[in-house]
Image: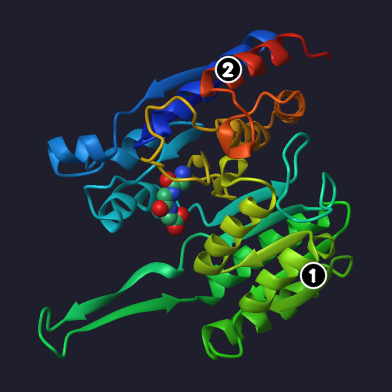
């Protein structure tokens, strides 16, 4: 029996609903496989915890998480606490504290999910966006001075280091090399941002020499939005800065049908620390408690978690179940269905139970 220690942090808004669904599905998968076990430990960290304790997670939170094989995360953010407090107090503290520098965001049009793009169906949009996850615009550098005065100033400094750019570029080239099309697009804004972004371009060209079998090109981020919309088939693997890829992956999710199906993995490729798996979407307070949150992104990120844990066959079984359920039309309203979170989850459990070897 292979056993994995998973830290579940559902956190805010619809996070508990989708993580609850994900854990049910992992339990069904464990029973179906027979030789994999998930030992789940629940953490009540998030905005409610903040309201009681003044912090999003305890001071020794990272030390508590360090012993786990993976972290299964819901969503962070609440309407009555500033977003920068909730985001930096939990999600970014884990990503940065565990140096999860590769944020991997697969996007494809799955069976039964309709893209808003005319004539685009399964196979026409199949990308992986690699988001640099440790520096750039999220490095936390900057400050405020002369608060409340007419001369008040605020700076938000993007930090790019050679180590940081080289390691994400190498990760993206390796990922592209392992995908059938061996195609990578490097996104920057090196016309207007003439320092760090030009360094990105230069390092991309240097790292490309190690991967002669990968075909690569460069795009400016603004032009990239047009290409993603008008020529989705021309793209495969994409690498961009923390902020650029954050924005592009929301667009990617929408083009593939809904942000509700889009997963993300925050990976420490060196495996010094646990990696963290979550849906891309946030806490969605507008639908919290209504029982209609789309759990598909949370199921899909569980596939990423299983791959990372070295269980590719189980990951593939889970992905087949997701596509079978969406293809059968068991879908939440954001992707055109009428099903509740529970109905989608029940259908997943049945699909996993009845799945072939
Ligand atoms: N599950 C993802 C999540 O909760 N995201 C909240 C958020 O605001 N993220 C900002 C970011 O990823 O930059």
Asked whether, in this view, residue 31 is left or right of residue 243, the answer is right
Which residue does the image show at 67% across and 59% down from the upper left? 171
Q: Earlier in the sequence, mark 1 or mark 2?
A: 1
Which residue does the image show at 62% across and 52% down from the upper left? 254
Specify the label residue 329 is tagged with. none
Q: Which residue is mark 1?
A: 210
Task: Indicate the quadrant where residue 307 lies.
Answer: top right
Which residue does the image show at 68% across and 54% down from the upper left? 255
The answer to which of 69 and 81 lies nearer the viewer is 81
Q: Which residue is mark 2?
A: 343
Asked whether, in this view, residue 61 is left or right of residue 119, the answer is left
Which residue does the image show at 53% across and 61% down from the upper left? 246
Mark 2 lies on a secondary structure that is helix
Q: Is residue 1 visible?
A: no
The answer to which of 333 and 243 lies nearer the viewer is 333
Mark 1 or mark 2: which is in front? 2
Q: Is residue 201 visible?
A: yes
Q: How is the image coloured?
A: rainbow
On the rendered image, what quadrant is the C terminus found in? top right
Instruction: Give coordinates of residue 350: x percent, y percent.
Output: 68, 11
Instruction: Give coordinates of residue 184: x percent, y percent.
Output: 77, 66
The vertical placement of 147 against 54, above or below, is below
Instruction: Give coordinates of residue 113: x percent, y percent.
Output: 72, 38
On the rendered image, what quadrant is the N terminus found in? top right
Instruction: Give neighbour class at mark 1: few <14, some 14-19, many 20+ (Cα, 10 Å).
Output: few
The vertical placement of 40 against 84, above or below, is above
């Amino acid at each position: 029996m292979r056993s994995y220690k998973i830290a579940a942090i559902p956190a805010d808004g619809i996070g508990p609903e989708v993580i609850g669904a994900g854990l049910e599905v992992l339990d069904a998968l464990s029973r179906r496989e027979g030789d994999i076990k998930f030992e789940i430990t629940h953490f009540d960290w998030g905005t409610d915890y903040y309201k009681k304790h003044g912090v999003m997670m305890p001071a020794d939170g990272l030390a508590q998480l360090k012993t786990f094989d993976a972290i299964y995360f819901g969503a962070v953010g609440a309407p009555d606490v500033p977003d920068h407090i909730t985001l930096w107090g939990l999600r970014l503290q884990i990503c940065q504290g565990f140096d999860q520098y590769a944020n991997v965001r697969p996007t494809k049009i799955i069976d039964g999910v309709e893209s808003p793009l005319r004539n685009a169906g399964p196979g026409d949009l199949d990308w992986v966006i690699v988001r640099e996850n440790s520096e750039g615009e999220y490095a936390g550098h900057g400050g405020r001075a002369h608060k409340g005065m007419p001369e008040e100033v605020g700076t938000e400094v993007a930090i790019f280091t050679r180590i940081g750019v080289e390691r994400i570029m190498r990760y993206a080239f390796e990922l592209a090399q392992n995908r059938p099309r061996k195609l990578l697009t490097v996104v920057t804004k090196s016309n207007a941002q003439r320092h760090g972004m030009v360094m990105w371009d230069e390092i991309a060209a240097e790292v490309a020499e190690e991967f002669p079998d990968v075909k690569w090109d460069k795009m400016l981020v603004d032009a990239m939005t047009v290409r993603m919309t008008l020529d989705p088939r021309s793209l495969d693997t994409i690498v961009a800065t923390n902020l650029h890829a954050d924005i592009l992956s929301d667009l990617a999710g929408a083009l593939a049908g809904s942000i509700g199906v889009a997963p993300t993995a925050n990976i420490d490729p060196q495996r010094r620390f646990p990696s963290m798996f979550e849906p891309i979407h946030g806490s969605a307070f507008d639908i919290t408690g209504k029982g209609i949150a789309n759990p598909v992104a949370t199921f899909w990120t569980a596939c990423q978690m299983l791959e990372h844990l070295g269980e590719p066959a189980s990951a593939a079984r889970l992905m087949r179940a997701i596509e079978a359920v969406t293809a059968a039309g068991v879908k939440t309203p954001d992707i055109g269905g009428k099903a509740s979170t529970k109905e989608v989850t029940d259908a997943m459990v049945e699909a996993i139970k009845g799945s072939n070897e």
